[in-house]
Structure formats: structure tokens, C-alpha cells
Amino acid sequence: MASLRGPVPDSTGSKPPHGVLEISWWRRVADHLATGFAVVTVVLVLAPLVAIFGYLVYKGIGSINLAFLTQIPKPPGELGGGMANAIAGSVLILAIASLLGVPVGIGAGIYLAEYGRNRFGDSIRFVSDVLNGVPSIVIGIVAYTIVVLRQKHFSALAGGVALAIMMVPTITRTTEEMLLLVPNVLREAAYGLGVPRWRTTLSIVLRTATSGIITGVMLAFARVAGETAPLLFTAFGNQYWNWRVDQPTAALPLQIFTYAISPYDDWHRQAWAGALVLIVLIVTAVAAVRFAVRRGTLGGVA
Amino acid sequence: MGVGIQVENLNAWYGKSQALHDINLTVEANHATALIGPSGCGKSTFIRCLNRMHETSPEARVQGKVKIGELDAYNGTSPTQLRRRIGMVFQKANPFPTMSIYDNVAAGLKLNGYSDKKHLDEIVERSLQSSALWEEVKDSVHKKSGASLSGGQQQRLCIARALAVEPEVLLMDEPCSALDPISTGKIEELIFQLKEQYTIVIVTHNMQQAARVAEFTGFFLLGRMIEYDKTEKIFTNPSDKRTEDYITGRFG
């Protein structure tokens, strides 16, 4: 066979010719150095996360019991009680924030990606990036002005509006980026079938980018779920149960803040427990949405 | 049944640069017409003008007259109306990645609001049979994603998707350029059968392919159509020197 293919390199020798297959010692060292560096950076990234979560579990798990999850706070000085109303309040405020913020953010992202190749789109991009950098306390003041002052009292709605404003820029920009990643040939395939543009955007482009958009939404959600400052003078906090959107409402971050700066040891312990519950809630919500979306979009498809 | 295409004085631009100059062409119904020419000569732009896909590019502009059968493409017809009568197959297979094989084929009907399940089943099966893919996928049309097929299968899926809306014209923009010889052979065989029912316009870089599948061939150069004739004539006895230079491999 070899003769048919012309001269071939000598393959009978046990050792390959120098410089062809042998890798120099320096390249081996550089390889290990680069890999080692990558591993170290991963550890550096993960270490704070693991440390925080570990410390929260260590400090908080002892105070989590049925009473903590089902009862409202006891008056100062009395032992026991829980944060049930704050957990429910956080869920209520976050639901309002998501209901308001997610559609606006995704809508704006669709506009930017599909129709926003112009000066108006550029200005929206700029404003959105600036909004992302506005301190959360300032957003709280805005919500105070446009909701609380009009309603004449603090409310879950005001807290939800403040958090929604914070969610919008993140969702807008990630949605835009995810939609731009959808190959143009898919849009053309749909146009070629006589599918109108709006339908193509909704059924093809948006659907293809779903998992990326969900990531953006969950990032925004996780970020605002722990926000305290914008809730201080919007949701305000409440020692009792509240299910009405137009009434002051307890929220986990607020309750943690109040308890952490209190002089009572029992409240300190409850603040740790509250922080642990908050993190678990966020992680559970993110995981649940991811799971649901994975089942939904790929249902039955390998 | 296929319909003929008439193109009169077609000009097209991308921004300020003119991509097509005064194209005049009559495409015979129920035949395959191949468009050949070097890269950047305007042949893709030309077929994208036939179904008004050209105008979806930024700053693109078209002038001239295109008639698909009795339908005046640029006068009193909306792009969506027009495209429902013209199927298009692209250079790179582009199945919808989130959809099953079935949904890919049914996409054109479903996304346009058609939902008669029983009839859809029939159309999907018939389209996949026409594109010679049915036997390979019939057990997994709902289970497998369109993106999980091989490259050649994906392209046949895209052909099935285009056929499902029952077009009168099928435009193919270098449908085999990303495929191996065996898949290419299957698609060419398919074109042979399809032209009994559809009018086919195929852009190709491969001159042998044009000679194999098409009755008529047009040669494009620098945005102009240099020559248009029976394929046999173009390849054996072209009347223009530039055509001859191109098909004998002297440039391009």
C-alpha cells in the first residue's frame, strides 16, 4: 500500500524524529501553569459562595423550626415567634415585581433586537444601562414618589414597583442579546414560509432564545429578591399578616435588617435564619423555573 | 402545479451599491432553471428578489417587475401572501431547533393559523415522502428534534417544510453546498421528481449540478445576466465569450 501513496515517513522506528511529536518541556510547564491558574480562579470564585452559604447554614439552621415558618413576630423581648408574614410578604412583593418587570423588560428587549437598529434604540440602550447603575435607594425614592405619595400610605405595590424598575434593565439587555444570538437564517426560514414578522418573532425567535431569556429573568429576580433599600420606604414592613397589595407589607430583607440591628439575641438568631430562608427561596425559585422551562420547551424532544 | 415566472427590468441595491442590473428573464413552469456564476455575481440576490426576501436585508431596495404566475409580486401583493406561494430552501439547512420533525414540517401551516390535526398529519407525511425523508424518520417525527438529524437529512427536512405549504414555485439557494456527495445525489434526484409538480429555480456553484438537474440555465456576472438558454446550449455552445470562459474554468 505504501508504495501506491508515494514515500511515507519512516514509521518503523520506535522513536519519532525529534521535533515532530516531542513536546518541549517548556510547553508542558506552560500547559500545567495555565490549567493550574484556571483551577485557582474557579476556587476563588466559588470560595465566597460556599463560605457564605456554609456560615448561613451554621448560624441559621438552629433557629429554623415550625414556629419560625408559621408564626408572626412576637413583641420585643418575648422569645419565639417567626417570620411567616415576612416570607409571605416577600413572595407577594416579588410576584408583583415580576408581573410588572418581566413583560416590560422582555418587550423592550424584543424591540431593541428586532426593530431597534436606529437612534431611538441606541438611546433606549443607553438609558437602560444607566438605569442599571442607579443606586437602589434612589429607585426606592422614585417608587415612594410615584406610588406611596399618591396612595398616601406604604404598600406591597410600591415595593413591587421599586423592584420591577430594578429588574427591567437587566432583563431588557439580556433579552436583546439572546435574541441577537438567534441565527438570522431561522427568521428567513419563517419569512420564506409566509409567516408574518410579528409571528416569526414570537413563535420562532423568542422560542429559540427562551432558555437564555429565562437566565436573564432569573438573574434579575435573584438580584432584587435580596434588596432591602428600595423597600425601606415603599413596602415599609409590617409586624402582622398582610395579603393586600395596597397595605404596608413585611419582607424578608426588611425583617432581617430590623432584627439584625436589634439588641435582642433571639432576634439576632432569627435574622440568621431569615437570611438562610431567603437564599433557599431564591435558589428554589430559580431551580423550579429552570426545570419547568426545560420540560416545557423540549417536552418529548430528545 | 407550478407556474411560470416573468421578470422585467429588475434592479436591486444594497444601500448605494447596485447588486442587480436590468435583469429580464422568463422561467418556464414545471421545469428546473439553474442560475450559475462566480461568487458575488448577484444570483442569490436575484432569487431573493423573487419572494421579496431581499427587502428584509437592511437598506435593501428593489425596482422592476416580477410576476409569479398571474401574481404581481411588487404591486398589490403583500410579502407574506407572496411567500406562501413560493417555497425557499437555503444554503445551510435551517430547521427550527426547538421543534420536532413534525412541527418543523407543519410550521408553515401552523404558524399561519391552520390547525386541522388530521389534515396536518396527512400533509406532514406526504411532504416528508416527497422529500424522501419519510422512511428514515417515520418512527420519530414527534420524538426527535429537527436539529438532531444529519446535515443531509436536515436539508431534506427543510425541503419538506417548504413543500408542506403547497407552493407553486420552489427557490433553492445553493441547497447542496454544505452536503457530502451522497446527500447531494439524493437532493438532485429529488429535484428531478419535484419539477413535475413545481417550478424550480436553483442557484448553484456547481456547474455539473446545473447540467444534471436543470433544463434551462442562466449565467450571471457582476450583477448582470449574461446569457440565458437551454442548459445544453449553455454548456456546449454558449453564444457569449464570457459564458464560455466561465464554464471552461478560465475564471470564477
Image (spheres, coloured by chain):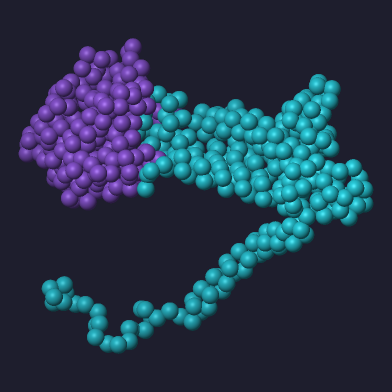
Residue at the bottom extreme? A14
Q: Residue at x 57, y 72 (%)?
A: A36
Would residue B102 be visible to someone looking at this image?
yes
Q: Position of residue A207 (x, y in %)?
A: 45, 36
Chain coloured cyan = A
Residue at the top extreme? B76
Left or right relative to B205: residue A82? right
Q: Position of residue B146 (x, y in %)?
A: 33, 42
Q: Quadrant of residue B100?
A: top left
Circle count: 0
Q: Residue at x 89, y 55 (%)?
A: A265
Chain coloured purple = B
Left or right relative to A70: residue A104? left
Would residue B241 be visible to someone looking at this image?
no
Q: Quadrant of residue A108?
A: top right
Foreground residue, B186 or A157?
A: A157
